[in-house]
Image: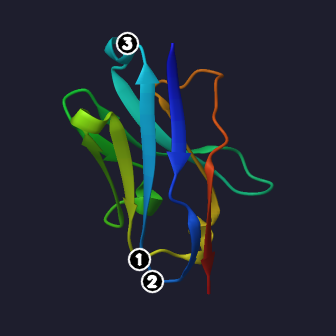
Amino acid sequence: QVQLVESGGGLVQAGGSLRLSCVASGNMFSINALCWYRQSPGRQRELVGVINRSGITRYTDSVKGRFTISRDSAKNTVYLNMNSLKPEDTAVYYCNVYPPGNNWGQGTQVTVSS
């Protein structure tokens, strides 16, 4: 089993940047890919992006060119680097293995003010 803990959220003005972190622990060998999701009030949880074991990434269209997923394998950490933030990026951001199971963490709140 894998445990994932997100951090790094906060309040930022539109156009600003944030970096979220996801620290993984447990059975690391079972992880083929990790992903970031987000959920804003009244909306379904949305896939933001995925990074696989080879470091290949893919993103949902709304964040392409603004968000990047990176990793530090030595620290068992995956990052979500968010630039040019928009108010519509406001959400709770979660990391999970991909495809995601039912075990979701508490997430980290990102609020972008206009």
In this rendering, position of residue 2 left or right of residue 70: right
Instruction: Find disc 3 in the rendering and name its residue.
Output: 30
* Spatial CA span between label 2 and label 3: 37 Å
* Spatial CA span between label 2 and label 1: 4 Å
Tag 3–tag 1 contact (CB < 8 Å) = no
Pinpoint residue 104: horizontal percent, then vertical percent.
Answer: 64, 31
Q: Which colour scheme is used?
A: rainbow
Tag 2–tag 1 contact (CB < 8 Å) = yes
Pinpoint residue 1: horizontal percent, then vertical percent.
Answer: 51, 12
Amino acid under disc 3:
Ser
First-in-chain label (2 vs 3): 2
Query: So how many labels did they put on this image?
Result: 3
First-in-chain label (3 vs 1): 3
* Among the 4 quarters of the image, the one containing residue 20: bottom left
In this rendering, position of residue 38 left or right of residue 98: right
Pinpoint residue 52: horizontal percent, then vertical percent.
Answer: 29, 30
Q: Nearer the viewer, residue 40 or 13?
A: 13
Amino acid under disc 2:
Gly
Instruction: Find disc 2 in the rendering and name its residue.
Output: 15
Name the residue: 40% across, 32% down.
Answer: 34
Residue 65 visible in rendering: yes
**Could you classify mark 1 by the number of other residues whose Cα lies within 10 Å: few (under 14), some (14-19), or many (20 or more)?**
some
Name the residue: 32% across, 44% down.
Answer: 58
